[in-house]
Image (spheres, helix red, strand yellow):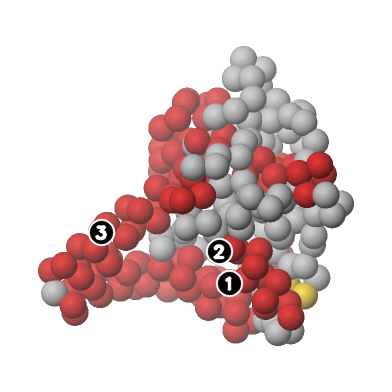
Amino acid sequence: MRLHPLVRHTLTFFAVLNGSGNPIGWSANHRLHHAQSDTVEDVSSPRIAGFWWAHLRWIWQAGQASISRYCPDLDRPQYRIWSRLQLPIMALSYAAGILLGWEGFFWLGSIRLVFALHGQCFVNSICHMGGAPSEPGTDSSRNVGWLAVWHLLQGENWHRNHHAQPWCARLGLTRWQLDSGWWVIVMLERLGLARDVKRPRTARGAAAVPAAQPAPQVAAVETV
Ligand SMILES: [Zn+2]
Ligand SMILES: [Zn+2]
């Protein structure tokens, strides 16, 4: 989808505030993950070194995916600015709660960040513990229902749906796969703040998701 610049930058601010990193680096890693899913080239695959590699270690140890290869389209000033703003925003994110006292410092800083970061990391770890580990290259992505609670029903936990149709803006495909992110996107679309929203290929939701299959070897086309 394409978002109005005001919405795009507002959402990017909150993503950086919650520790997701800058949009260029995030997008390069994300596109590499889709292009090389479950191969040795997939920087965050648990098949490289298990759960903790996929959950946290890859962030420090795998290195940054090539920006010139995976997202040259985003290597522009409007996105580069977030790389410079990242450190001050994270300092604000960590420490601003002190204005409300020590309780604010811990609950709005450290505890919120631990909650938000592990919620993001679970997408790469727990949501990729499926498939057949002895067969590299087979799709390890899976939907994890209980993670919906940790994600505050925001939809990222329906990760197999996402890998099956990575162009699709909707993550929860059935009535019970709650996806509040999708409801926000629909609202933005109706307000004229989102366009080119990609929907599932069929209206039958889960029926559109094929069974586990070899990971796609082409780069996903996604826009932030
Ligand atoms: Zn993705
Ligand atoms: Zn994935």
Observer-side mark, 2 or 3, equals 3
Q: Amino acid at mark 2?
A: Pro
Q: CA distance from mark 2 to mark 3?
A: 22 Å
Observer-side mark, 3 or 1, equals 3
Position above or below: 221 against 157: below
Q: CA distance from mark 3 to mark 1?
A: 27 Å
Q: Which residue is found at the position 64% from the left and 25% from the top?
A: 131
Which of pointers 3 and 1 lies earlier in the amino acid sequence?
A: 1
224, 141: nearer the viewer: 141
Q: The N terminus is located in which quarter?
A: bottom right
Q: Amino acid at mark 1?
A: Tyr
Q: Provide the secondary structure element on which disc 2 rests.
A: helix
Q: CA distance from mark 2 to mark 1?
A: 7 Å
Find out if the beta carbon at label 2 lies less than 8 Å from the nearest ligand 1 atom.
no
174, 15: nearer the viewer: 174
Q: Provide the secondary structure element on which disc 1 rests.
A: helix
Badge 1: residue crowd in 10 Å (few <14, some 14–19, many ≥20): some
In contact (CB < 8 Å): disc 2 and disc 3 = no
Q: Which residue is mark 1?
A: 79
In contact (CB < 8 Å): disc 2 and disc 1 = yes
Q: Which mark is residue 23?
A: 2
Occupied quadrant, residue 33: top right
Q: Is residue 157 visible?
A: yes
> In this image, 170 relative to 207: left or right?
left
Q: Which residue is mark 3?
A: 110
Which of pointers 2 and 1 lies earlier in the amino acid sequence?
A: 2
Find out if the beta carbon at label 1 lies less than 8 Å from the nearest ligand 1 atom.
no
Q: Amino acid at mark 3?
A: Ser
- Residue 29 image point, x, y percent: 58, 49
Badge 2: residue crowd in 10 Å (few <14, some 14–19, many ≥20): many
